[in-house]
Image (cartoon, rainbow, N blue to C red):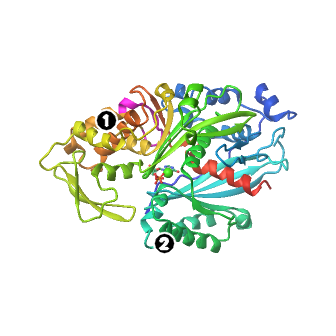
Amino acid sequence: MEYGKASFLKGRISVCRQNFFSRLFKERIFGKCDSCFFSAGATGALIADPYSAAPRGPSRMAASRLPILLAVAFSSLSCILSHSNREMWFQDLFPPNTCPINAKANTFYGIMFDAGSTGTRIHIYTFVQKSPEKLIELEGEIFESVKPGLSAYADQPEKGAETVKRLLDMAIDAVPPHLWKKTPVVLKATAGLRLLSEEKAQALLLEVREVFEESPFLVPEDSVSILDGSYEGILAWITVNFLTGQLSGQNQHTVGTLDLGGASTQITFLPRFEETLKQTPGDFLTSFEMFNSTYKLYTHSYLGFGLKAARLATLGALDMEGGQMFRSSCLPKQLEAEWHFGGVKYQYGGNKQGETGFKPCYLEVLKVIKGKLHQPDEIRGSSFYAFSYYYDRAVDTNLIDYEEGGVLEVRDFERKAKEVCDNMERYNSASPFLCMDLTYITALLKEGFGFRDSTLLQLTKKVNNIETSWTLGATFHLLQSLGITY
Ligand SMILES: O=c1[nH]cnc2c1ncn2[C@@H]1O[C@H](COP(=O)(O)OP(=O)(O)O)[C@@H](O)[C@H]1O
Ligand SMILES: [Ca+2]
């Protein structure tokens, strides 16, 4: 089992100070409270177009500004899903007109597992509540991951659950024993389990549930489940816009989000034009109510269009039995190797006799994408936050720095794809799939979603030291549903 990079919570983040209180927020959010402060500088920077802070963007914001933003963002936030079931989220979790100054700190925790197709991750969030009036703030996160993901244990569910148990042991160390019983633990699985048979997926979830039941934590009903694809996009959108302060104040400039997982990919944004709403199929739209305004989000999850699923589709190996050699012009000519994904072994190799390089590779990849995705006109000129494999492949090819992230144009991915695909021997030491992955990302952005070459992408892994993952949005939802306010 391989452990990923860990990021641990830095020191405590201070909350209320005096003197810098922004009049706007004071009146709007804290009402009668006189002694809280809001750094106008930080507010401006976070609410302004995040791309103006390029290349490091909002992730460089001082950590000490985070809790205030969280308090402001959620102080009167609720959201309503508008599909068939209307549901209130976050209501009363962050009440308006309260001031946490001089209140006794009360720390509590929420544990959210992301069972992704390529790995399982634990996010242990720490919150503080400074007053009985229920204002809670996110203080930080402990994050750890293991590979492979649960779906690789489709035929050995107990072994899969064991990987979850090892991560959960971290939470036993991180959460003080007297809070174990009050700390909820939840696991949500994404595309890897969506693609398994119902029987195998349920067997895995059952084993994980047993691990949770044996732990000292609070195990809510439905604590282990498969996350619906559209929630995945919405929750990630909430996380990013929340962490960057876009859900608070009057001059909101929310940003769209692009998540590229191993087996599925999501696009989520807030349409600005009536025309977009008219052109969009109903099941791509979801409504939220926040600060007394309604946001109608465009969101869709494309199952089978994650980076690794796309490799199989490009190789023509989807739904095929093993024991066969799959070849592609996107791979080094002489290559012959094996690859394991979702518990299946595939043999693959380069086009020994035929063509290799960017042009033939792009044509191959296009067959997987062309005509399969909805293209909202509005996004052509917009900027988006992009993470997961967009981030990883940009790091692998030195387009951005691992720690800092950065701003790229869509054409940067194409330039890099050409460079790698047309010089595969030079990139021998990197993954043999590097050319295919970059070409897929280029084609997905341009031909799939319909972005322009000049569309800006803010590549972000963390904002204020918190991972940009759907798990934070899911944890707020969890706390709300449990009425955990202490
Ligand atoms: O919390 C996170 N922090 C950083 N990267 C993450 C996190 N969660 C997922 N990723 C990234 O997501 C990608 C893998 O996608 P995943 O395994 O979640 O597939 P899926 O979303 O299709 O199920 C990798 O690039 C991995 O680094
Ligand atoms: Ca994911």
The numbered disc on residue 372 is none
Q: Could you tell me the amino acid type at mark 2? A: Pro
Between tags 2 and 1, which lies in front? Answer: 2
Q: Is residue 209 above or below residue 459?
A: below
Between 29 and 301, the residue placed more toward the observer is 301
Q: Give the residue at mark 1.
A: 416
- For the image, the number of numbered tags is 2
**Callout 2 environment at 10 Å: few (<14), some (14 to 19), or many (20+)?**
many
Can see residue 166? no
Q: Which mark is residue 157?
A: 2
Which of the two residues, 155 or 236, is positioned nearer the viewer here?
155
In three-dimensional space, the C-alpha distance between marks 2 and 1, rounded to whole angstroms, equals: 40 Å
Picture quadrant of residue 462: top right
Local secondary structure at mark 2:
helix
The span picked out in magenta is 401-412
Verify whether residue 404 appears in magenta: yes
